[in-house]
Amino acid sequence: VLTSVFAEFKARNGGPRRGAARLYNIVATEAAFIIWKFRNARVIGRDDGEGDQPHRVTRREAVGALARVLNQRLSDDQRLTNRVKYGNKALSRDVVTSTWSGVLHNEARLPPDWLRQPGVLVGLVIPRFRGLGQGGM
């Protein structure tokens, strides 16, 4: 996690893909934080009505938590492109577009100026893992 900021992604022409590196950094750090929160809930304990049996995080819970966090980060990035409100501290529209393009839900159907549209979501596919029981990670 600490070295995720140093990840480099190259385009076919050999140039850097800064948007991909930024997205990787966001996903790596947010996923690590979610894992930490789930672990704390298990270790510290939470009353889930199952007695001594520790709560096992399901695929749906894990993907849902990651989707919520990534959608919030996307929404934050959209808001932070507002030059009127944030002036020279605003995020570049190009940075936000290059970060999130390719991972948006129904991206082909989005308007050209999707940065100004509320409700744009990150599209996550829940992976199927072989050999695991009902919903377990």
Image (tube, rainbow, N blue to C red):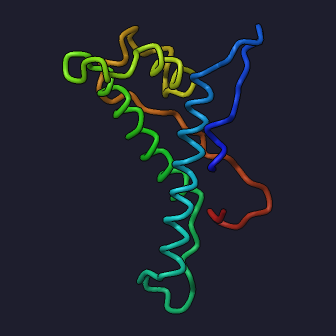
Q: In this view, which residue lies farthest toward the right? A: 131
In this picture, is 3 found above or below 121?
below
Eyeballing the image, is 96 above or below 131?
above
At horizontal 51% and vertical 59% (from top left) the residue drawn is 61
Where residue 23 sits: x, y (%)? 56, 32
Examine the image and state in which quarter residue 77 appears. Answer: top left
Is 128 in front, or is 66?
66
Give percent across and percent down for residue 21: 62, 29
Q: Residue at x 58, y 38 (%)?
A: 25
Compare residues 136 and 76 and report the one nearer the observer: 76
Residue furthest out toward the left: 85
Q: Extreme bottom residue here? A: 52
Instruction: Specify whether 128 is left or right of 125.
Output: right
Q: Residue at x 62, y 62 (%)?
A: 135
- Left or right, residue 137 beside residue 115: right
Quarter placement of the C terminus:
bottom right
User: From the viewer's perspective, is 56 left or right of 130?
Assistant: left
* Percent x, y of residue 58: 58, 63
Q: Position of residue 55 (x, y in %)?
A: 54, 77
Which residue is drawn at the image coordinates 49% and 19% (left, top)? Answer: 107
Number of marks drawn: 0
Farthest residue toward the front? 88
In this view, 95 is above or below 132: above
Q: Is residue 64 above or below residue 49?
A: above
